[in-house]
Image (spheres, rainbow, N blue to C red):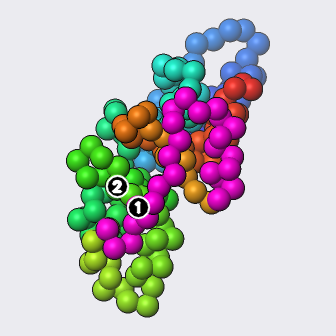
Amino acid sequence: SSTGTLLAAALKYCKEQTTPKKVLVFVCDTGNKYLSKMYNDYWMLDNGFIERAQHGDLRDLILRPYSQKDTVVVSPTDLLTTAYQRMKLYDVSQLPVMEGEKLVGIVDESDVLLHVYGDEARFRDPVSTAMVSKLDRLDVKSPIEALLPVFDRGQVAIITSGDAFLGLITRIDLLNFLRRRVQ
């Protein structure tokens, strides 16, 4: 009952026909395997199946815009275990730390690891104890080339417009953006 097997058999059958025929294949997939990607808008965006409005600036590279409530965030008072669980659940390596609508820091896997290594009880410490609060920000109107020095420093690009936080851009976001431009 594998979806792949069903589709392969249907395609093989169709190729063997000498006259045009209509073929119906029931694909009984719950979406927990092959079709799971179809339920993931971020995967669909990354692979060009969903189009998003283009702005002609760095917003075009932000996969999870904060203004659309797509950015996974934590607050400074959340526990590190909460930050870890969100990173794992949403398959992200870093989280913006928000106090209301204000970006006050960022916490990534390394920050959490270095903080809790040797004393796992520190997972109960607040995010504020492990986050980085000295942030380098890029204005949304910066050229795409401005991302490279940020990535060379091993950082994620924090994109803002004035004081407003717009989202993050990672190396893979830039690679996906460049790949989509050649398709």
Extreme top residue here?
20
Q: Quadrant of residue 117?
A: bottom left
| Residue in view at x 34 percent, y 55 percent | 104
| In the image: residue 169, left or right of residue 64 | right
> Which residue is under mark 1?
133
Location of residue 133 with respect to 103 vertically, above or below: below
Location of residue 84 with respect to 34 vertically, above or below: below
Location of residue 49 with respect to 120 vertically, above or below: above
Looking at the picture, how far across and down is residue 28, in whole percent? Answer: 43, 37
Are circles 2 and 1 on residues that touch, CB within 8 Å? yes
Q: Quadrant of residue 182?
A: top right
> Which residue is under mark 2?
104
| In the image: residue 25, left or right of residue 175 | left
Q: Quadrant of residue 129?
A: bottom left
Q: Amino acid at mark 1?
A: Ser
The kind of secondary structure element at disc 2 is: strand
Asked whether residue 151 is drawn in magenta, I would say yes
In magenta, the rendered stretch is: 128-153
| Residue in view at x 43 percent, y 48 percent | 32
